[in-house]
Amino acid sequence: MKIGFIGLGIMGESMCANIVKKHDDSVYCFDLNGEQVKKLAAEGAIPCGSNAEVAKNADVIISMVPKSEHVKSVYSEILPYIDSTKICIDMSTIDPSVSVEVAGWVKAKGGRFADAPVVKSKPAAISGTLGILVGCEESLYPAILPILSYMGSNVIRMGENGKGLVMKICHNTLVAQIQNGVNETIALATKLGLSIEDYAKAISYGGGQNFYLDGQWKNIQNENWTTAFSLENMHKDLGICQRLASEAGFDMPGMQNAKRVYDKGMQMGIGKEDFRATYKVVRGD
């Protein structure tokens, strides 16, 4: 089974590299950044000159691109090459409604489609230990699980098309709210004379311990904003959550507060920095 991978960004590059290492058949790749294509070719992938070339050659087509409009653009380009022999897996984080729409395009051509967004960031992409949240027909899931397992150690089917993305948005919104609470209380603690290291140790003794703090307090202490998952990407995800909540007629004040922090981060021009850089927003830089 030949696999194609479209989108070799911060996450996609390492995800594709894991497929190349673990899969025993051809892996085709394409990205608008030609240097990324060359890098994956050096690791054993077959370079392609377009999305269409990937789709022509691959039995399973994986896409990992930034936004809803990019997914629609990719699938508009590859749709002429989709038929009953093709499986499409979009691992981008986009609006669930757009994913369902694209799934309809693929199914109308006889193909099969899954949304499979990922959780965790670059280190997990490198190690192949991502969490992967899948939305697809129940009958498709066993066929794609071995491929997804090249990239992730925790894979779960959440339901039909779009449900993987609903879960991803819920997950990231929760992370943003936890993060905002951590950032606020670290900032208060330091203003009142406590060190970040002591704060983190003390939190670990009680119910406030959390994955975000455990993994990020040293980076915050060292003012390290090197990007593993960008502020602008989390801002996008919160925007999706805001739309979902509005469509559902559901009030989410915690999400709205986190969204305001991210809005300000974007206004400050720090969108390309890691999402923990929202600490600077909360601190009042």
Image (cartoon, helix red, strand yellow):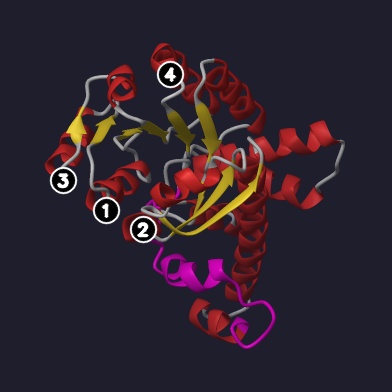
Mark 2 near mark 1, Cβ–Cβ under 8 Å?
yes
Q: Quadrant of residue 222?
A: bottom left
Q: Is residue 285 visible?
A: no
Q: Earlier in the sequence, mark 4 or mark 3?
A: 3
Per the model, the C-alpha gap separating discs 2 and 1 is 10 Å
Query: Between residues 185 and 80, which one lies in front from this camera angle?
Result: 80
- Label 4 vs label 3, nearer the camera: 4
Q: Position of residue 281 (x, y in %)?
A: 57, 52
Residue at 23% over, 52% down: 21
Q: Which residue is mark 4?
A: 82
Instruction: Give yes or no for contact between labels 2 and 4 (Cβ–Cβ under 8 Å).
Output: no
Q: CB under 8 Å between callouts 1 and 4?
A: no
Q: Earlier in the sequence, mark 1 or mark 3?
A: 1
Residue 117 on image: x %, y %: 52, 44
Query: Per the image, is 220 magenta?
Result: yes
Q: Magenta span covers which residues?
A: 203-229
Tell me the CA gap for discs 1 and 4: 25 Å
Question: In this rendering, is residue 3 above or below 129?
Answer: above
Q: Secondary structure at mark 2?
A: loop
Residue type of the residue flagged with mark 4: Ile
The quarter of the picture where the N terminus appears is top left
Q: Which residue is mark 2?
A: 128
Q: Nearer the viewer, residue 5 or 12?
A: 5
Q: Which residue is mark 1?
A: 22
Numbered disc 3: secondary structure = loop
Q: Which numbered disc flags the more N-terminal residue, 2 or 3?
A: 3
Alpha-carbon distance for marks 4 and 3? 27 Å
Residue 195: x %, y % from top left: 52, 80
Identify the amino acid type marked 3.
Answer: Glu
